[in-house]
C-alpha cells in the first residue's frame, strides 16, 4: 500500500523532493502499524501518542516536498491520513483520532497561510478525513460496546464449558474411586477387623490415589484398571508424569504418541509377571521421546521409547 501511495504521488507533477515525500509516507506507515500491533483495547496510550506525532510530522513532510497546492501528490496523503484516523477509532482511541484530525487541520491551515491561500490545503485533504473520522466514531460508539459484550459472553461460555468438563471429570473419578473405597471405609467406620484381602485392597487403593497425584497425564480408566489388576498379581507398577502441565496445549503429534504409549502400557501390564517392575513415564517437553515404558524382571531391563 505504501508503494501504491508513493507511486501515485510521484508519477504526477509537483513533487520537489521525492526522497522527503517517500520518507513522509514511511512515517505514515509507522502510524498505520502501531494501531495494528499495539497491545490492549483501547490501544496503549503511548502508542496512540506516537501515531499522532508520526502523522503530524509526515503531513509536514508531504507539504514541504510538494509544490504549493498541487492536488495530485496531496491526494495520496489525504487517503493515508484517513486510514490512520480509521485505525485509531477501531482500536478504541476515538479521542486521539479527533485530536489527530484537529492537529492535521491546523498544520494545513498554517501551510496554506505560509504557502498559498489559507484554505487551499484544507479543501484537498480535510473533507475525506472528516467523513472517515465521523463515520468511524459513530461505528465505535455503537458497535464496539456490542463487540465487548459478545466477547464477554464468549469468555463466559468458555469458562462455563471448562467448569462443566472439570465437574464431569471429577464426578467420573469420584465414581470410579467410590466403588472401591466406600466399602472399605464403611468397614473401618464400623470397627470391623479387615481381612488380608481387604488390607490388600487398601494398598491397591492407596497406590491408585498416588498414581492420580504423580501421573495426571496417565489418568486413563483402562490404564488404571490394568495397573490395579497387575498390582493384584504382585507386579510393581510406577506411573510418572514429568511432561508439560495440563495448561499447555497438547498438539496432534503428542496426543497421537500418548495414545500409542498408553495402549502399549496396557499390553505390558497385562503380560507382566509377578515380581516384575513396570515403569510408565511421560517425559518433559523438549526430549526426542514423549514417553517410555521400562520392565525390570530377573535382573534384566527392557525399555520402549515413544517419539
Image: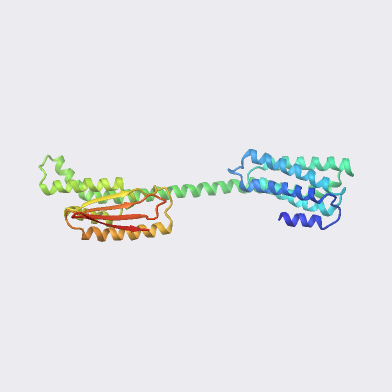
In this view, 284 is above or below 222: above
Q: Nearer the viewer, residue 41 or 201?
A: 201
Q: Nearer the viewer, residue 98 or 117?
A: 117
Task: Look at the image and tell me in which quarter the C terminus lies.
Answer: bottom left
Residue 95: x, y in percent?
68, 40
What residue is shown at x 74% (from left), y 51% (from top)? 80
Residue 212: x, y in percent?
29, 47
Residue 217: x, y in percent?
34, 51
What residue is shown at x 82% (from left), y 58% (from top)? 11
Task: Look at the image and tell me in which quarter the N terminus lies.
Answer: bottom right
Q: Nearer the viewer, residue 269 or 1?
A: 269
Q: Is residue 28 shown to the viewer in this render?
A: yes
Residue 40: x, y in percent?
58, 43
- Asked if residue 234 lies left or right of residue 162, the reply is left
What residue is shown at x 84% (from left), y 40% (from top)? 110
Q: Is residue 138 shown to the viewer in this render?
A: no
In this view, 3 is above or below 106: below
Which residue is at the far front?
299
Amino acid at each position: 500500500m505504501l508503494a501504491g501511495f508513493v507511486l501515485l504521488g510521484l508519477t504526477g507533477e509537483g513533487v520537489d523532493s521525492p526522497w522527503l515525500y517517500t520518507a513522509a509516507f514511511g512515517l505514515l506507515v509507522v502510524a498505520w502499524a502501531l494501531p495494528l500491533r499495539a497491545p490492549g483495547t483501547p490501544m496503549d496510550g503511548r502508542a496512540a501518542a506516537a501515531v499522532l506525532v508520526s502523522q503530524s510530522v509526515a503531513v509536514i513532510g508531504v507539504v514541504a516536498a510538494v509544490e504549493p497546492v498541487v492536488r495530485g501528490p496531496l491526494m495520496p496523503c489525504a487517503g493515508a491520513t484517513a486510514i490512520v484516523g480509521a485505525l485509531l477509532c477501531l482500536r478504541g482511541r476515538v479521542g486521539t483520532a479527533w485530536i489527530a484530525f484537529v492537529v492535521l487541520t491546523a498544520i494545513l491551515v498554517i501551510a496554506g497561510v505560509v504557502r498559498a491561500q489559507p484554505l487551499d490545503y484544507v479543501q484537498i485533504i480535510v473533507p475525506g478525513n472528516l467523513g472517515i473520522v465521523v463515520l468511524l466514531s459513530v461505528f465505535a460508539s455503537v458497535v464496539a460496546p456490542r463487540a465487548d459484550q459478545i466477547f464477554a459472553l464468549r469468555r463466559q461460555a468458555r469458562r462455563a464449558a471448562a467448569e462443566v468438563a472439570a465437574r464431569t471429570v471429577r464426578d467420573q473419578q469420584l465414581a470410579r474411586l467410590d466403588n472401591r473405597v466406600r466399602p472399605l471405609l464403611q468397614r473401618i467406620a464400623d470397627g470391623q477387623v479387615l481381612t488380608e484381602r481387604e488390607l490388600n485392597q487398601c494398598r491397591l487403593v492407596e497406590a491408585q490415589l498416588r498414581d492420580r497425584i504423580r501421573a495426571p497425564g496417565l489418568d486413563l480408566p483402562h490404564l488404571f484398571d490394568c495397573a490395579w489388576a497387575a498390582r493384584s498379581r504382585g507386579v510393581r507398577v510406577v506411573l510418572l508424569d514429568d511432561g508439560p502441565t495440563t495448561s499447555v496445549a497438547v498438539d496432534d503429534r503428542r496426543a497421537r504418541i500418548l495414545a500409542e504409549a498408553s495402549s502399549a502400557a496396557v499390553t505390558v501390564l497385562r503380560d507382566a509377571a509377578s515380581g516384575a517392575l513396570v515403569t510408565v513415564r511421560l517425559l518433559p517437553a523438549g526430549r526426542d521421546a514423549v514417553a517410555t515404558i521400562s520392565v525390570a524382571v530377573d535382573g534384566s531391563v527392557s525399555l520402549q521409547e515413544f517419539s
